[in-house]
Structure formats: C-alpha cells, structure tokens
Image (cartoon, rainbow, N blue to C red):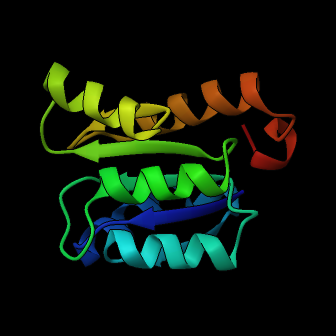
Amino acid sequence: MRILIVDDEKTAHQLYKLMLITEGHTFFHAHNGQEAVEIFTSNPDIDLILMDIRMPVMNGYVAAKKIRKLNEEVIIFAQTAFDLAEDKRKALEAGCNDHLAKPFDSRVLRKKIAQYFKSSRSATSSAGF
C-alpha cells in the first residue's frame, strides 16, 4: 500500500510508520493540508491517507474535501485528539471515510485498514491484511 501520513507533529509520522512498517508499505509525509493535497496530486495512486485535522496552513477538513474532489476512491481516516460526535460528523462531511481518536494503538489502526481494504478494494492481498 501507498500511505500518506498528514500530521504537523514529526513524532506522529514516525509512530504511524512504526505501526505499519512491518507490512512493507510505501510512506509519504505531509506536515499540513496544503502539502497533503500537493503530494496526492503528484501521487494519485496513494491508497490510504491518515489525515490529522488540526494543522497549520490548511486544516484536515479542507484538505480532505480537496483530495476527495480529485479522487472519490482513496480511503481517508481523520485523526483528532477528540472523540466527539461533532468531530466525527465534520470529518465524514469533509469526505473522510472514518475517524480515529488519538491516541490509538496499532491494533485499532490495522483493524480499520483491514475493514476498508477488504470491503472496498481487491488490495487485500497486496496490502498484507
């Protein structure tokens, strides 16, 4: 899988990569929503986006909307430090497929990835899930 990690915290990039590195994925990193849109535009075959919501320059809601206009199929998981119903609703309205409340452990992330790629694509075998 090709995974775009969007977070303004460098430690988050490292953490998510460590959670998934054993699967042999290719990773891209963006520090804000604007970078995420630019990276996705240059790499439209990205399979999964882990999108932080609160970032400088362009927030995750706006970036998700822009990316969704470019590609209706890419899986986008919103990541927030809050697990409020309002945050989840906003993420889904912005075009995200699902919502993860930080902090989460690798089992939760892997389970969600398996759920979406098993049901939405034939990438299950190439994704290692």
Drawn side of residue 20 relative to residue 96, left or right: right
Q: Is residue 50 visible?
A: no
- Along the line of sight, the residue nearer the viewer: 19 or 123: 123
Location of residue 122 in the rendering, given as x and y in whole percent from the top left corner: 87, 34
Residue 23 in which image quadrant: bottom right
Q: Name above or below for residue 81 compared with residue 60.
A: above
Residue ID at (72%, 56%): 1
Q: What residue lies at 63% left-to-right and 73% top-to-bottom?
A: 41
State whether residue 90 is above or below residue 61.
above
Residue at figure coordinates x 18%, y 19% from the top left: 85
Looking at the rendered image, the quarter that the C terminus falls into is top right
In percent of width and height, residue 56 lies at: 18, 73
Q: Residue at x 37, y 31 (%)?
A: 93
Front position in the image: 16 or 81: 81
Apparent side of residue 118 relative to residue 59 in the rendered image (left or right): right
Total numbered labels: 0
- For residue 84, which quarter of the picture? top left
When the figure is inspected, residue 78 is found, relative to residue 22, above or below; the finding is above
Horizontal side, residue 85 vs residue 75: left or right: left
Q: Position of residue 43 (x, y in %)?
A: 70, 74
Image quarter of residue 72: top right
Is residue 2 in view? Answer: yes
